[in-house]
Image (cartoon, grey):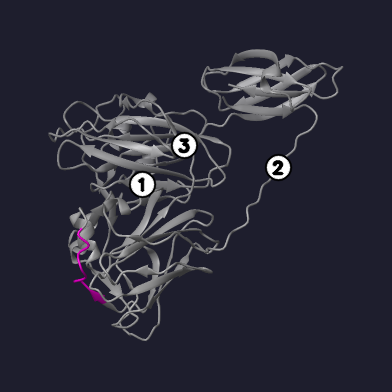
Amino acid sequence: MKTILICASIVSVLTIAANAQNANITWQAPTAISGPSDVRTLGNYFASWAPYNQDSFNNGVKGLVVNGTKFRAQTDFQNLNLVNFNNGYTSYNNPNTSDANYNDLMQSAVYNGNADGTPLVMTWGGMVPGHTYQVQFWANDGRGNGRSETLTGGANTSASLVFGNNPGEWIIGTFVCDGTGTETLTISGVGSVNGPYPQLNIIQVRDVTTVPDITWQTPATIAGTSDVSTWGTYFASWAPGDGGANTLPVNGVTFQGNSDLPGFNTTDLDNSYGNYTAPSTPDANYNTLLQYATFANETPSSLTWNGMTPGDTYLVQIWVNDGRNIGETRSGTFTGGANTSSSVLYGSDGSGPGQYVTGTFVANSNATEIISINPFSTGPNPDSQINLLQVRDITLRITSFSVSGTTLNLSAINGAANGPFILLGSADVTKPLSQWTHILTGNFDSGGNLNLSSSVINPAVSRQFYMLSE
């Protein structure tokens, strides 16, 4: 239930300011390499690096995948700066886990070959200040030379990772990104019969910021322009791959080929295609937009944006459409916070047009949402895909409020079209909602608007609070 609280005599505003925190990394204890479940999947992937791993390099955008995480020899860390990363080696001992890709990754590393005790220093950027990140780092040698190293982030240094004896170890650290949007990791090697050669086999960083749980509706088959919600106020959209999208309005909504989502970023949605089968709805613009999409090869992908108003309620819609009858059933689920949607069908098996799914959520203090996409296919192409996306602010808003004698005048927007509302009243704002007086009920109009003028004011009461809810 969404509510707006109004006081007939006093209006106050509370502003909360958050102070930036230093990017000190809090380290967990190192853990021995054992199997693919070592690779953590909390939150959403941000970046990775598998230096000198030729198989990962040769596999291109697919990289080498372990437990759903793609490690890249061609790193996707942003604004990466490296000091003393001057040598590589590709024949470290195999840790003999149950996962061939994991074993492959552990046999390659970058290291400081100076043997002078100077550390490796790695700095990257592109993070969101105030977001919480998890860094996971692996070191493996295993040739029996007793090597170890420590990691330092901010003012905190980890316990020693012992990696000279088989198998090596991994470690996790967490930090809150400061106002610079960057982090620096210092790797110091000690205790080797061959000299202090600090090294890095693989690393991943994940955004583990708490984001709102999205309440998903049941996916619906693409049918016509009324699919496109006009509830509330347009916030942003994305029509990937279609440079002319903003000339093709649908149901009064203009989709943007270059997304206008604030702070917009995607992981692995780095391919596009513009010849999917049109869904044959009655609207030419809708059909054209749905022939374009962005997609990612095989592994889970994600998208994120920010700039929302904390406490406001938002609606998100995501469309997928293929329809080429390629002989495989393709689908995807979407996860926001703790909630995952039902499977949204692409229509790639000749069953008809694709589908769209709608979700709602309340923006939290981070003003950020992250949606991960998990694809499925009965064939060889379980690609994440998005054809269209829109976000709308559906927060119930009072646009005007006044009192004239005993008459309360109130206007509101962003109610549910033709949906019901309730006006409650109380002289004591601290009372439980169950003890507020039921003043009147009614319905928003077809546009979700309300213009109310009713004699509900009691002159004998010095102060009265009202609550509008739907």
Can you give x and y, in whole percent of width and height, for residue 117 in the image? 39, 83
Identify the mark nearer the N-term, 3 or 2: 2
In the rendered image, residue 293, in percent from the top left (x then y), is placed at: 28, 42
Q: Is residue 339 magenta?
A: no
Left or right relative to 441: residue 56: left
Q: Residue beneath label 3, please?
A: 213
**92 is within the stretch colored magenta:** yes
Please identify the dominant SS of the magenta region. loop
**Taking 316 as reference, is 404 above or below it?**
above
Residue at the spot of label 2: 14
N-terminal-most mark, 1 or 2: 2
* Badge 1 or badge 3: first in the primary sequence: 3
Residue 438 lies, with reference to residue 298, above or below; the image says: above
Q: Quadrant of residue 316?
A: top left
Residue at 27%, 45% in the rendered image:
295
Percent position of residue 243, x then y: 33, 47
Indicate the secondary structure of the residue bearing disc 3: loop
Q: How many angstroms separate mark 1 from mark 3 (CA)?
A: 15 Å
User: Which residue is rendered at x = 82% and y = 25% of the image?
Assistant: 463
Closest to the observer, 311 or 108: 108
Label pair 3/2, CB-CB below 8 angstroms: no
Q: Residues in magenta?
A: 88-96
**Does 10 sit left or right of 25 as displayed?**
right
